[in-house]
Image (cartoon, rainbow, N blue to C red):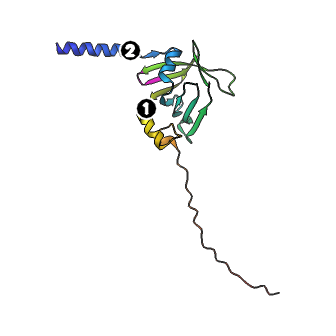
Amino acid sequence: MLSRSILVALISTAMLGTAAAGQLTPEEARQFIAGKYFAFTCFDGTRGGGRIMNDGSVAGTIQFSGEGPVRVAHLPVNTIQVGSTAVCASLKGIPFEPCFNIDKTDEVSFRGSVSGMGFAYCDFHKHGNAILVARARRHPRSLAPPAIAKPERARVDMKPEPVALELRRSQD
């Protein structure tokens, strides 16, 4: 009897997990993503973390191609727009408005890909809000984990060296 109960529980969990995964509608994507902190890694090695606010603004950090400096990124209100049929981005300097497929992979993760270009994707993993509160207290402006929040700056010790001055009277 106990093994039958365990089997039913496992099947139920598997079915719920399958139902919870899959492509999200724009409204489901907004509810799942907005206001929460996600770390991400992309197909080209780009990585970072941040959050999309309810107003469509974006704040976080990014390291392009997984190399070089970690940069702080802020995108204005209505950068991410949730329509009735799609989630799209409005970015200055880009002649078109890219839209995205949002596929929920589990209860804390999703994959976002550019519509029509499935190879161009990023995987996002949610970080707990308790961690964010603790980080916000230590780094009020930072949205990234401490390891990449503020890149180390080179320190240069500028110790003054003694200078020997020799004063001579002119022979005029």
**Mark 2 sits on what residue?**
18
Relative height, residue 75 to residue 118 (above, below): below
Q: Please state the horizontal and vertical placement of residue 125, each as a whole percent of the image.
A: 45, 28
- Stretch in magenta: 106-110
- Give the numbered dot on residue 92: none
Badge 2 crowding class, 10 Å Cα cut-off, few under 14, some 14 to 19, many 20 or more, is few
* Amino acid type indicated by mark 2: Thr
* Residue at x 48% of width, y 39% of height: 136
Compute the Cα span from label 2 to label 1.
Answer: 25 Å
Closer to the camera, 139 or 99?
139
Decide if residue 7 is on the left or right side of residue 95. Answer: left
Query: Within the magenta stretch, is there residue 148?
Result: no
Decide if residue 113 is on the left or right side of residue 15. Answer: right
Pointer 2 or 1: first along the chain:
2
* Amino acid type indicated by mark 1: Asn
**Mark 1 sits on what residue?**
129
Mark 2: secondary structure: helix
Q: Residue furthest right?
A: 172
Q: Please state the horizontal and vertical placement of residue 145, each as a whole percent of the image.
A: 47, 39
